[in-house]
Amino acid sequence: MLIEKNNALQQIDTYFPLYDPDSRAVNWWITAGTPKSIKMQAVKTLARKDDFIDWMQAKWAYNIFDVDWLWSLHKKDHPYWQQNRDIVLHALKKWKTTKDGVWLQVAIQRVHPHDMLAQEIMADAKPLLQSPWAEETQEFQSWFLSLWQHVIRIHLARGEAEEISALLKKHWDYFDKKWKQYGVYSIEFKSVLSNIFRWYIYTGKFNEARSFLGDIKKKFPYSFYRWESILALNIEEAESIALSSHKIYHYYSDNYENDDYFWRAMVDILPLKELYRIATNKLIYKEYRKMIAKTIFTRAILLNYDNKKIEEYADLAGNLNPSIRELINEHISKDDYYKYISLLLKIPRLRPTVYLGFCQDPVNNHIVKFSEFDIDSHNPNDNNWWCRYDISSLKEEIFNVSFWEWEKIPRLEAKTSVGLRYYG
């Protein structure tokens, strides 16, 4: 069924493109000129006569807010924004004349929060959110949820926290309504909460984020440990939250965004003293401690620490990593710096950066057992002894995982059902 769905989406994409491939305009079907594609010409002609075709293209056209709400803060002079506004005006006009809610949905999904049109669109949308929805069709429920999400998006960009709080509390039932046709309402609801956290942190509103987190945790006590870790006021607090997130992940089914990606990225830039504290904390996962201990030992060698310290860190690394203990002891016993270098060459896993992410298989979600003596050919520049310690890249990674683990911001990309597209 999934293959059939993707095939159908690909067919739709040939008629209703995200944007004109030549001009890259997203509003191509409501502007002057004739597109080169015969199929696009047909859409443009039919859209003037048939509201359904018109709506299909308006709905399918590239929308930056499908990618990230944060884009309203960037590239304000980009031609996309005026093109997008043309679509908003077009949809708003259709809504006013037909009173068909699908056009209101297009308008509110696309409008820039600081556009004067946003207030007019919200004024039409918010009264509709007072309607009962739980017993309606799945199509109506999805439409209703979409209006709610984008009213929140607009209030968020305007700094209207009280309105956001009221909208959330009014509609906690989105979370309680579990199933819909293609997913779970609770997940969509929590994704809106996640977007609010991301916005506050990205814009430096940490106090607002902590206050919001306190309110949300009353409703979702076993979720959002990721954000607690990011908003921690010191290293120890971030660490303890990361530990708690693992317990929550294992023991509670109703959990969301409880990963420790931020803490793992933060560990990479910690000084040796802090790493030692973590490696000797028995509450930390042993697999993490094993990797950290090897990094401590490696850094001590590379930074030419005195022999006493090197021996101390060697004992820690050896005790936590029995497979290399004998080799470590053999090379440090002679108190020869060149022996230390020889040891590093023999054990590729001895590297100056921790990279705790290599502990976890992201597909199967279990601890990966790397051989200490084999070169990692899949991650040659990160998981071997010759990997460099690039503090700028490591700090950038902390920024990236703070928002979305695989996503770099800002970047004008669209993730669609038919693949990754680039616009402009």
Image: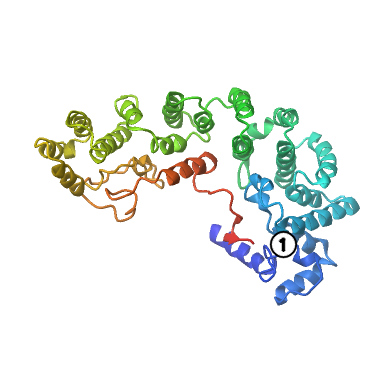
Residue receiving disc 1? 26
Q: Please identify the quarter of the rendering in which residue 279 is found.
A: top left
Residue in the foreground of this view, choosing between 19 and 10:
19
- On screen, 168 above or below 385? above
Q: In which quarter of the image is the N terminus?
A: bottom right
Measuring from the top left, give residue 320's x and y in whole percent: 23, 32
> In the image, is 170 to the left or to the right of 189?
right
Measuring from the top left, give residue 86's x and y in whole percent: 80, 58
Residue type, mark 1 in image: Val
- On screen, 343 above or below 38? above
* Coloration of the structure image: rainbow
Residue 153 visible from this viewpoint: yes
Residue in the foreground of this view, choosing between 217 and 263:
263
Q: Please identify the quarter of the rendering in which residue 177 is found.
A: top right
Measuring from the top left, give residue 67's x and y in whole percent: 62, 50
Measuring from the top left, give residue 170's x and y in whole percent: 73, 29
Residue 1 visible from this viewpoint: no
